[in-house]
Amino acid sequence: MSNGKDAVRDLVEHAKQAGLTVKQTRNGKYQITNPNRPETRPVFLPPRAHSGPDLDNYRREIERLIDQPPPMVTAVTETDPEQLEAAGRNWPITLVMALAERYGVTWKVSGGVLFVTAPLGAESVAQVLRDREAEVVAQIRLEGEQPMSRAQPREAADDGGPTAAKTMSASAPAKTATPAVRVETEPETASASVTDIAELLATLQTVLQKIQQAEAERDAALQRASKADVKADALERELADAKKGREESEQLLVEADRELARLTGERDHYKGQLDALGGAFAALKGYTR
């Protein structure tokens, strides 16, 4: 699948082929329900889902709604189980595993390796599981199952006959009833809705973006404040230099006033002496006459 939109389209098409009802809501989501099981909770599939685990969760929810395989599957199971080896490769792995159970196939996972045991006549079904080993192991882990053999089909033991005798019959698979996809029995309240989780993640993503935007604005404000502090420090240094220069100028002015007073005193002193000398010279001049 190239992107989330194509993956959602494939899931919707698969749900329609399985007989589920698909309606698109006002907000663009696909509401998927099972008309034969109205008591089950519908699946709300967003128009574009994330790839990976999200798609697997939605696919699993859709498989839970399916109560019987599509007509194509029924036709195969009513004729020859060997047709599953070719046709079953394109089916969802949960459907293949459910059909394998109906044919008496058991499996277990040990050390990450899948071991499949099939009764006579169901080897072709087991081969499909072996070919899709990675998907089977992933599905078992997804369902939280322990690595032990699956139980034999209930129909094989209800009539009181030995299970081994039932599974060893070559004609038994062709006479079984129409197989149904395995439905999980866990309560609906045991797991949160995938849609609710997706919406919560979207809300958290929005909140995270707002937090990141606020942090970016805070960093920009701090940078502006830092620049303002640098300018303020420069102005304070200039003011201190100017104040120091003013004080030095005032000190020079005081010293100049002192020097002026000293020179004025000396001038007055010399002037007094000149006046005295002038008086003495005038007296001497008058005496000589």
Image: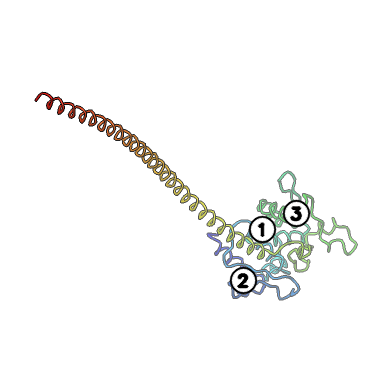
Nearest to the observer: residue 213 or residue 104: 213
Q: Position of residue 140 (x, y in %)?
A: 73, 54
Q: Nearer the viewer, residue 219 or 179?
A: 219
- The quadrant of the image that shows the N terminus is bottom right
Instruction: Quote the CA–CA distance across marks 2 and 1.
Output: 32 Å
Numbered mark located on residue 238 in the image: none
For mark 2, give the secondary structure: strand
Could you tell whether 214 is left or right of 89 in the image? Answer: left
Residue type at mark 1 is Glu
Q: Which residue type carries mark 3?
A: Gly
For the point 66% across and 58% down, which residue is it?
85
Residue at numbered disc 3: 144
Q: Is residue 248 left or right of residue 28?
A: left
Question: Which type of secondary structure does the marked residue at label 1 adopt?
Answer: helix
The C terminus is located in which quarter?
A: top left
Here the colouring is: rainbow
**Sequence-wise, which precedes: disc 2 or disc 3?**
2
Amino acid marked by disc 2: Tyr
Secondary structure beneath disc 3? loop
Callout 3 environment at 10 Å: few (<14), some (14 to 19), or many (20+)?
few
Q: Nearer the viewer, mark 3 or mark 1?
A: 3
Q: Which mark is residue 85?
A: 1
Neighbor class of circle 1 (other Cα within 10 Å; few <14, some 14-19, many 20+) is some
- Of the two numbered discs 3 and 1 on the same chain, state the one appearing first in sequence: 1
Q: Position of residue 221 (x, y in %)?
A: 49, 53
Asked whether disc 3 touches disc 1, contact meaning CB atoms under 8 Å apart, the reply is no
Which residue is denoted by mark 2 in the rendering? 30
Q: Earlier in the sequence, mark 2 or mark 1?
A: 2
Q: Label 2: how many residues lie within 10 Å, few (<14), some (14-19) or many (20+)?
A: many
